[in-house]
Image: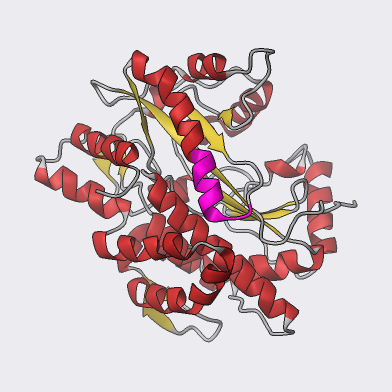
Amino acid sequence: MHIPFAASPRSSIGVEWELALVDADSGDLRQVAATVLEAVAPPGGGEHPTIKQELLLNTVEIITGVCRTVPEAGADLQRSIDTIREVTDPLRVELMCAGTHPFARWSNQKVTDKQRYATLIDRTQWWGRQMLIYGVHVHVGIEDRRKVLPILRAVLTYFPHLQSLSASSPFWGGKDTGYASNRALMFQQLPTAGLPFQFDEWEQLEAYTADMMHTGVIDQFDEIRWDLRPSPRLGTLEMRICDGASNLTEVMAFAALIHCLVEHFSTMLDEGKQLPKLQPWFAQENKWRSARYGMDAIIILDAQGNEELVTEAVPRLLAELEPVADRLGCAAELDGVRTILRKGASYQRQRAVARRNGGELDSVVAALVAEMRAGKPL
């Protein structure tokens, strides 16, 4: 099976952000995505170019075009938010994002009437119906297919940094799960989701895909739902690690960190340097530790099994990436990661709000809505 990899400008960037639609008064989810999508559709019909349908009727996804810089992607996302608010404000609907909604019941949510979603739910049943989760996906253009898998393996060594920083799903169905990112472990229950296989050659990926299609596991490549995956149709490496972010500033911080990592590893390949990689069992343990402990995770740094607290590892990584950020025009956005280290990740802020309000989770939703309005952590 031949999987062509599209031509893509090096280190171009695109961002996808899944947003929940919540009632302005109760904070519960509202099933109004169809109303929003119909209102923003172009006059001639068809889909809005940057505001898209998702699995559940309580969700819309906003996407950027192909951007050169993180600030350009941020401006693109802000335009989409402004467009949506013209529809949602009169409906008394707010935009909210976190890895999960703090108290909404998955059993009350309605699935978008589309064949591919119906097929997914029919196959995955109880786990599929529970996918009341939200994420941020970042695409970075790779100019040479030979670079894709080495860079994927290298980014995987920084999986726990990204997951800990973005962790925003401590609550599920009104209960504190004890996890920083409950979303991370829920999503991997779907077939083909979870950590990617660490293939050495593109032909191994092609053979895997052929096997999955031959046995009916998938019908097309996009149904491989790994946390990091090549996107051959777009010519990108797609990072799907991050929990949903409550505000644009943090989305841009995560995008800048990913953008810099990919460009950094691409440059190392150009210079003939060896890229880092981890044994699959270390990668798996890092995912669990960062999902469970978030910013308190002690992560495995390298193939030798050296370990460090993630909040000590991140500043060193930021210092290493600063020259790359200057080159890519995202130094200010990358510095937003330091704000997260200072103010706490979203899951920490959510728990703090819950504590201050006697455990009432509607106050957590209100805080998430306020951060979305403010465009920054509060």
Residue 161 lies, in percent from the top left, at 44, 66
Depth check: give the residue in front, 12 or 103. 12
- Magenta residues (range): 68-77
Residue drawn at the location 45% of the way across and 38% of the way down: 133
Residue 353 visible in the shown view: yes
- Tally of numbered tags: 0
Residue 99 lies, in percent from the top left, at 40, 44
Residue 134 painted magenta: no
Residue 157 visible in the shown view: no
Q: Quadrant of residue 207?
A: bottom right
Q: Is residue 20 left or right of residue 359?
A: right
Residue drawn at the location 49% of the way across and 83% of the way down: 305
Depth check: give the residue in front, 156 or 251. 251
Q: Main secondary structure of the magenta part?
A: helix
Residue drawn at the location 50% of the way across and 26% of the way down: 56
Residue 104 lies, in percent from the top left, at 33, 29
365, above or below 342, in the image: above
Q: Is residue 119 left or right of residue 349?
A: right
71, above or below 358, in the image: below
Depth check: give the residue in front, 369 or 44. 44
- Name the colouring of the figure: secondary structure
300, above or below 141, in the image: below
Residue drawn at the location 25% of the way across and 54% of the way down: 348
Residue 10 lies, in percent from the top left, at 72, 61
